[in-house]
Amino acid sequence: MRAQYGANSDGSVSVYNSGALPNRTFTEACGRAWQTNATGEPGSLAVQFPGSPAPGDYRVLEVDYDELVVVYSCGQVGPFGIAEGGWVMTRRAYAFPWTVIS
């Protein structure tokens, strides 16, 4: 998957995700992200994609600005479920294991 970001005039961030699924079909999604608490939690973001009933809650846990960013998300799904996920996003197509581990 590939993610591209850009600045919107309203202060939010454009999000464009694209890539191949395991079945080798191409997929893409365009959305936007914004800070939910810029002064208290600058790494707290809401991310909304068309068709989503509500924005996702994303927390930036670690950034080194050269190689990677670590993001965590947890949210309610239906009346009884919780969806939880984490991502390590790198600037390279393939991350060296020591980059992610350290």
Image: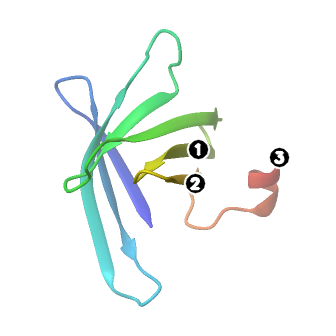
Towards the viewer: 34 or 74: 74
Up the image or down, 11 lies above or below 6; here it is above
Amino acid type of the residue tagged 2 in the rendering = Gly
Query: Which quadrant, please, contains the N terminus?
Result: bottom left
Amino acid type of the residue tagged 3 in the rendering = Ser
Q: Earlier in the sequence, mark 1 or mark 2?
A: 1
Q: Residue furthest bottom?
A: 23
Residue 80 horizontal/vertical position (percent): 49, 53
Total marks shown come to 3
Residue 17 horizontal/vertical position (percent): 34, 59
Residue 82 horizontal/vertical position (percent): 53, 52
Circle 1 sits on which residue? 72
Up the image or down, 26 lies above or below 16; here it is below
Q: Is residue 90 visible?
A: no
Tell which tag, 2 or 3, sits nearer the viewer.
2
Tell which tag, 1 or 3, sits nearer the viewer.
1
Circle 3 sits on which residue? 102
Amino acid type of the residue tagged 1 in the rendering = Tyr
Q: Residue furthest left?
A: 9
Answer with left or right where residue 48 lies relative to residue 39.
left
Up the image or down, 43 lies above or below 98; here it is above
Q: Are marks 1 and 2 in contact (CB under 8 Å)?
A: yes
Q: Secondary structure at mark 1?
A: strand
The CA distance from mark 1 to mark 2 is 6 Å
Circle 2 sits on which residue? 85
